[in-house]
């Protein structure tokens, strides 16, 4: 249950949504928007202030044609982008346990994959920022259907924050998946948002048999405007099944090849419940003797804790690493899996150290 907003939070929300103080009554403020008036009590310590604030939330929700729960959440946590997942035909919001757990894992995987994708393509994002974002991201269970709301923290500034960019990347991926699933153009789809392996996660959002319709909705923080309104992406019957089938095909069609990647470590991830000892290395890949361009971040699954510790040390020192192994799926994207002798750290001092 969402707590009752404080007076300070209510005032900030009303001011940010175009309400203005038009008069006063016994120390309380009367805020007006169009033809609607609401009363804001003078202090949180009044005996009936909680009741008055709850009434305020209900009245504001009615005026803005939103649910009281959404209004209260927006007052309490204004600096978040909300990604909502709902399964359309789950009776009474109930679903079989295996399918429900699978859907929750899929939500987590999509958020994590999009955050990592942003970090890999952004020179200003440190690897540790992805883990920090996930730790600060909140999860709220839905009460109108089976689903969850994911609250991604966003910060104001000249550059869009990692939380906002993660939500935008997930929106782009959702639209691309929907287009491919409904237009029957999977075979010709080359969009990274479709081809990067997120198909399996999207398919897992579609209920027990991956055939149910579902919806992803994106609502942007009012405190950090996104320049666009809320967006809902509706996946129809059968879309999840088709998307999942493409994901399975992608996971089986990565060609067996040898690869060498040399460059700087940009990210590290050791998920004890998932992918172990995975690092990102930015550089050019040489696959079966052919140089792939342009330079990009390649996911490398290391052989064990010792290599992972060496990669962490190389990242801290800014040293170049060299990974040699076979091309395979690493997480949900194409990467390289190395053996016990497939990872080495350059003994040359880093550029940063030479500059110092």
Image: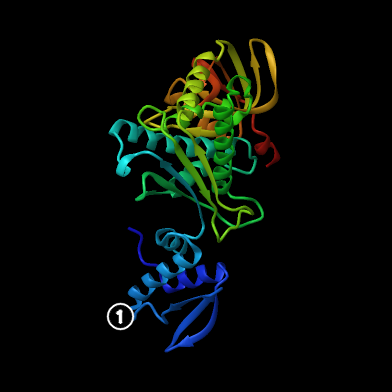
Residue placed under numbered mark 1 in the picture: 47
* Up-down relation of residue 49 to residue 100 (above or below): below
**In terms of secondary structure, where does tag 1 sit?**
loop
Report the colour scheme. rainbow
* Up-down relation of residue 190 to residue 325 (above or below): below
Give left or right: position of 340 versus 176.
left
Please name the residue shown 34% across and 79% down the image.
45
Q: Can residue 283 be seen?
A: yes
Q: Where is residue 124 in the image (x, y as percent from the top left)?
A: 63, 44
Q: Where is residue 221 in the image (x, y as percent from the top left)?
A: 54, 56
Q: In which quarter of the image is the C terminus?
A: top right
Q: Observer-nearest residue: 328 or 308?
A: 328
How many numbered tags mark residues here?
A: 1
> For residue 348, what is the image quadrant?
top right
Q: Can residue 316 be seen?
A: no
Q: Position of residue 57 (x, y in %)?
A: 41, 68
Please name the residue shown 47% across and 41% down the image.
215
Q: Observer-nearest residue: 5 or 184?
A: 184
Q: In which quarter of the image is the N terminus?
A: bottom left
Q: Where is residue 264 in the image (x, y as percent from the top left)?
A: 62, 30
Q: Observer-nearest residue: 133 or 15?
A: 15
Crowding at dot 1, Cα within 10 Å, few <14 / some 14-19 / many 20+, comes out as few
């Amino acid at each position: 249950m969402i707590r009752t907003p404080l007076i300070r939070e209510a005032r900030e929300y009303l001011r940010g949504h175009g309400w203005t103080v038009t008069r006063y009554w016994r120390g309380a403020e009367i805020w007006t928007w169009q033809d609607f008036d609401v009363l804001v009590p003078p202090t949180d310590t009044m005996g009936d202030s909680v009741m008055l604030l709850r009434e305020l939330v209900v009245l504001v929700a009615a005026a803005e044609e939103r649910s009281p729960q959404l209004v209260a959440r927006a007052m309490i946590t204004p600096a978040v982008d909300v990604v909502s997942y709902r399964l359309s035909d789950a009776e009474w919001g109930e679903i079989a346990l295996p399918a429900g757990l699978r859907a929750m894992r899929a939500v987590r995987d999509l958020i994590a994959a999009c955050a990592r994708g942003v970090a890999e393509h952004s020179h200003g994002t440190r690897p540790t920022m992805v883990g920090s974002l996930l730790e600060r991201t909140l999860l709220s269970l839905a009460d109108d259907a089976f689903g969850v709301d994911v609250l991604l923290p966003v910060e104001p500034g000249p550059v869009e924050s990692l939380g906002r960019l993660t939500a935008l990347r997930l929106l782009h991926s959702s639209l691309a998946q929907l287009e491919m699933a409904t237009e029957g153009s999977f075979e010709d789809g080359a969009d990274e948002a479709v081809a990067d392996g997120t198909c399996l996660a999207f398919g897992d959002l579609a209920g027990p048999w991956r055939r149910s319709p579902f919806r992803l909705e994106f609502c942007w923080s009012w405190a950090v405007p996104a320049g666009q309104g809320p967006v809902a992406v509706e996946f129809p019957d059968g879309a999840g099944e088709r998307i999942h089938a493409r994901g399975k095909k992608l996971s089986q069609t990565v060609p067996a090849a040898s690869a060498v990647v040399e460059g700087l470590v940009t990210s590290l991830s050791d998920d004890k419940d998932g992918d172990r000892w995975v690092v990102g290395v930015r550089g050019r890949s040489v696959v079966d003797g052919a140089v792939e361009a342009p330079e990009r971040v390649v996911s490398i699954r290391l052989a064990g804790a010792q290599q992972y510790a060496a990669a962490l040390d190389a990242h801290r020192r800014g040293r170049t690493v060299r990974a040699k192994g076979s091309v395979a799926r690493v997480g949900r994207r194409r990467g390289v899996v190395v053996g016990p002798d497939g990872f080495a750290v350059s003994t040359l001092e880093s550029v940063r150290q030479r500059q110092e």
